[in-house]
Amino acid sequence: MSLDPTLRNIRGTFDILPQAAASEGAHEVPSCAWQHVEQVIREVLERFNFREIRTPILEPTPLIARGVGQLTDIVAKEMFAFRRGETDYVLRPELTAPVMRAYLQHRLDQQGSVQKLYYLGPCFRAENPQKGRYRQFHQFGVEVIGAETPEADAEVIAAMMAVYEAFGLRKLRLRLNALGDADTRPRYKAALQAYLEPYAEQLSAISRKRLETNPLRILDTKDARERRLLENAPRILDFLSPSARAHYEAVKAHLQELGIAFVEDPFLVRGLDYYTHTTFELESPDLGAQSALAGGGRYDLLAQELGHEAAVPAIGFAAGIERLLIALQAQHYAFPEDPGLDVFLVALGQNAARWSLCQAQQLRREGLRVDLDLKGRSMKAQMREANRQQARYAVIVGEEELLRKQARVRDMRTGQQHDVAFDELSDFLKGTVVRLT
């Protein structure tokens, strides 16, 4: 089969197929593995009493520009934005700003003092596609809105760690830092600029631009020469106010009490303007240079950036499902196999085909996974199809079986065959079917 090349899926996106795939434009992990991962994520987060929130894929462009920050790479270079009529739209590049918008718009503060929310869905960025980085990717994460205590920070980090522990991932590293309160970041920004300005000519073109606009992003550099220049740079922890330091120390103490290991990293600032106080990132060595599995932090100032009259304490994390899948594959995670069918109905002739169509519906109402031939093929071809779909049983009916009102039921594992009356077929199958796991 052929397809007009101009109609293939867009570079940086992929199809998720029912079976494992090796073709270009398809993700190698089948849909049943994605479903398993999503189910585990939901189960873990719901044990922490997080409740799901779903926001639109389309959001107003100003929401992301104001929420994420005009000078961030996301807004400056990575948004898929367009105008229709008088409205500017963007395909959401992240979900924290949309969740905060929903919180404010729908007055979720009136539903309880603290909102514990989780999400799972696609996001879009104009990335240069590479392993673990796509133009359409899938995020999951949580937001705790309305709690300013260090316990809330520890709860979010504990929930993040619990997800990855549920998959049995090893060799993970949690990096931790603090950005302080509203006064800390401007003072540190000025100190960092003063330190780096004499070295401006030694910085890359990107870092020279960031030096004027967003110097904290230089701390994220992977350039070896710039890393050496930063060795003696001022540390943001030295600029924390007493209350900000107390908050950070309390978070560390809670993590230690919970048995969650971490390393302090003064260079961890993350790329979004709305972060304050705690910031963190979880890394896996199985991801290569782009090692981040998940990350997040506190963003008490975001609500005001969106026009709210006062700060709203909030903290959360976001994580990529594609990156999680890469780490799971690297550690040879045993994804559950597709369970296959319980029953495949093999019909010989038009009358039997009509009977099979009705019988399939009845068996499905009884909770069985059932399929049937829709192409009018031979018995041999239908049996091959039953075998291909890993059916536990094949139920064979032709004119003779219709007259006797008995079906031939073949055990596809053993080859044994039974004659079963039509009115006993459902009970027989429900009593003998053992689902594949």
Image (cartoon, helix red, strand yellow):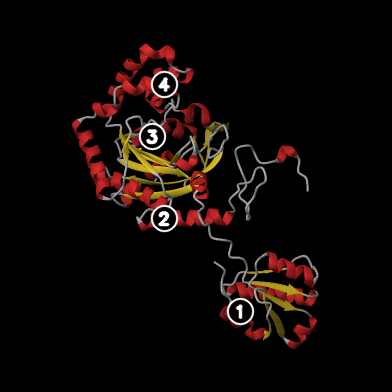
SS state under label 2 = helix
> Considering only order in the chain, which callout, 1 or 3, is on the residue closer to the N terminus?
3
> Considering only order in the chain, which callout, 4 or 2, is on the residue closer to the N terminus?
2
Q: Residue 166 carries which label?
A: 2
Report which residue position mark 1 lands on: 429
Q: Answer whether residue 399 is visible to the viewer in this image.
A: yes
Left or right: 286, with 429 as reference point:
left
Residue occupying image coordinates x 49% and y 26%: 76
Query: Vertically, is 246 above or below 119?
Result: above
SS state under label 3 = loop
Q: Which of 58 and 278 is in front in this view?
A: 278
Q: Which of 402 and 433 is in front in this view?
A: 433
Q: How packed is label 2: few (under 14 Cα within 10 Å), some, or many (20 or more)?
A: few
Q: In which quarter of the image is residue 406?
A: bottom right
Which amino acid type is marked by label 2? Ala
Query: Vertically, is 148 above or below 194?
Result: below
Q: How far apart are marks 3 and 1 (CA)?
A: 58 Å
Report which residue position mark 4 lands on: 226
Q: Residue 385 carries which label?
A: none
> Considering only order in the chain, which callout, 4 or 3, is on the residue closer to the N terminus?
4
Report which residue position mark 3 lands on: 306
